[in-house]
Amino acid sequence: MPGAGQLNALIDILKGFQDVGVGETTTDYKLIHHRVPAQQEDVSGGQTRRGHQIEVTVKTVFVIPWIEGIDPHWRVRLLDGKDTGPTFEIVSVIDRTGMRRWLELHCGDVR
C-alpha cells in the first residue's frame, strides 16, 4: 500500500464506448475520473504471440485509491504539467489488499 507522499502521479481514467456504424465498430473513450492521485510503478513488459493473436503484457502498474467499476480495456492517461501525456490500456484490475481500499491497474501500451 502506498504511504504518505508516495502517490507520485495524477491520472485520468477513460471508459470505452462502442459505436456501431455501417460496416464497422469504433470505440470512443470518454473521461470518467479526472486527476486521480496514483503511485506509478514501471515494470517490464512485452508482447507474446498466441495463435493468431498478440497478447500485451504489463508495462506499468498504477496504484490508486479504491474506485468502484473500473474494467479492463478502459484506459489511463498519465497527466503531466499540461494535462496531457501517454495513454495506457488497462490489462487487469486487482484489489490490492482484498479490502476495497487500493486498486492496482496493470497497464500495457495502447494498441
Image: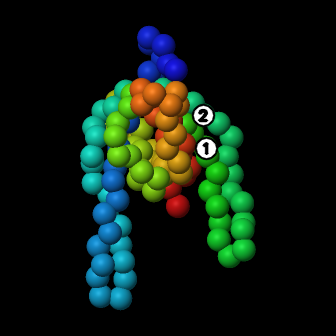
Q: Quadrant of residue 68?
A: top left
- Can you name the residue that lies furthest to the bottom here? 23
Residue 1 screen position, x and y as percent = 52, 20
| Residue bearing mark 1 | 59
Judge whether 89 appears above or below 52 on screen.
Answer: above
Residue 18 located left or right of residue 49 = left
The reply to whether discs 2 and 1 touch (Cβ–Cβ < 8 Å) is: yes
Specify whether residue 16 is in view: yes
Residue 74 located left or right of residue 32 = right
Residue at image coords 42%, 26%? 101
Of callouts 2 and 1, the N-terminal one: 2
Q: Which structural element holds mark 2?
A: strand
Q: Which structural element holds mark 1?
A: loop
Three-letter amino acid code at the position of disc 2: Asp
Residue at image coords 57%, 30%? 41
**Residue 42, which numbered label?**
2
Residue 40 screen position, x and y as percent = 51, 30
Depth order, front residue of 89/72: 72
